[in-house]
Image (cartoon, rainbow, N blue to C red):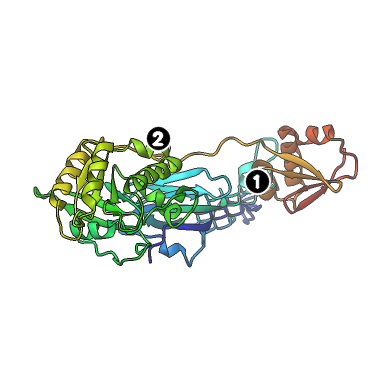
Amino acid sequence: MFVDYAKIYVKGGDGGNGIVAFRREKYVPMGGPSGGDGGRGGNVIFVADEGLKTLMDFKYKKHFKAGRGEHGQGKKMHGRSGEDLIVKVPVGTVIKDDGTGEIIADLAEHGQEVIVAKGGRGGRGNARFATSVNRAPTISENGEPGEERWIRLELKLLADVGLVGFPNAGKSTLISRISAAKPKIADYPFTTLVPNLGVVETKNKDTFVVADIPGLIENAAEGAGLGYDFLRHIERTKVLLFVLDTAQTEGRDVLEDYQVLRRELEKYKPELLLRPYLIVANKMDIPEAKENLEKLKKLEPGKVHPISAVTGEGIEELIEKTYELLKSVPEDVWTEEERVVHRYKKEEPPFIINKVDGVYEVTGARIEKLVMMTNFNTDEGLRRFQNAVIKMGLEDALKEMGIKEGDIVRIKDFEFEYTE
């Protein structure tokens, strides 16, 4: 089954906790702090693999979690890092943040990889907090939580040439003629339900890849028919072939068909109309097609190539003409946004405060991370948290909002009673 869209959950491994420990050996007086650091959590890494052609694997498995880091130990022994989770995806997969729609990565080449969920760093053990003033600290950090998010995977086929046309225009018959692809062919609309790829060979043994895109209809860019689901596969093609039913066997006007196809591409992505193209006037074995062929030639001089996908008329000439046009196209026709390998997150405010039912709810990645990594079981850990909050400006912000003695402040699952 061909699947070109998936929504999945990814989570980097949590960092291991640092610990509080002291050397207690018989002949080592005042051994000092020896708590080790926790290990780093594993990353979730997506890698492009040319051996995969579909997102089928993500249809049944939706959650991907990397290993968590081990906790630190005494004698300054650090915890082992969590194992990275390597996930293979087809070449041409675009990864987007499901919440924002922002592109995280576009894996357009074999072997390209990207971290989609970073593992948390390990918490520091008390050995890390020893100073000349405090030689026996009783403070340690919890491990940092791993990054988690819902992401969308969108597969855009990598093909040199895209066949664009209405249902029953003859695209499937054409690709079966010019390549070894064997699509389903029948005399009813939407026979092609998935994109088909075929490798075409010229008379000089040069090759190029053609994609047969399921038939478009009017308003496909708004979701009508099957076009919306598969328009993305046209984006990476370098040359477009508009395949038209020149004999008008479906009762539609061939000139109107051509204009509708161009309008749908323009509505979906205007830059697609800047791609080199040919008009393939199909079904020339039917007598009614000849008059319409002349109309097309007047509309687009030099762009129209008559063929019959059924009889093979004009097929070899079309292959050679398409390859010549393909050779004239620069190697890279994608926009800068499409070629992005990774886009880093924008700087976020350290916290946001909302008053809900008398409770001051504080959110934000930075403040939430501080809470999760603080060990509140020790007085030193609590004092360190209070100092960090003051430096961050949270206390001043709460005062500006009118917080009073005894009011409740909630950060994630923790609640604190405010005191001056």
Indicate whether 271 appears above or below 78: above
* Position in image of residue 150 (x %, y %): 55, 54
Question: Which mark, residue 369?
Answer: 1
Residue tagged by mark 2? 336
Residue at 48% over, 54% down:
224
> CA gap, disc 2 to disc 1?
34 Å
* Labels 2 and 1: the sequence-earlier one: 2
Give the amino acid at mark 2: Glu
* Position in image of residue 341 (x %, y %): 41, 41
Residue at 23% over, 40% down:
297
The reply to whether residue 140 is in sight is no
Indicate whether 290 appears above or below 403: below
Q: Nearer the viewer, mark 2 or mark 1?
A: 2
Total marks shown come to: 2
Give the amino acid at mark 1: Lys
**Residue count near mark 1 (Cα–Cα under 10 Å), binned few <14, some 14–19, many ≥20:** some
Q: Nearer the viewer, residue 25 or 207?
A: 207
Left/right placement of residue 297 relative to residue 57 reads left
Residue at 65% over, 46% down:
369
Question: Which mark, residue 346?
Answer: none
- Which part of the image, by quadrant, shows the N terminus? bottom left
Mark 1: which secondary structure? helix
Q: Disc 2, disc 1: CB below 8 Å?
A: no
Q: Nearer the viewer, residue 238 or 136?
A: 238
Q: Nearer the viewer, residue 261 or 15?
A: 261
- Which part of the image, by quadrant, shows the C terminus? top right
Left/right placement of residue 119 relative to residue 399 reads left
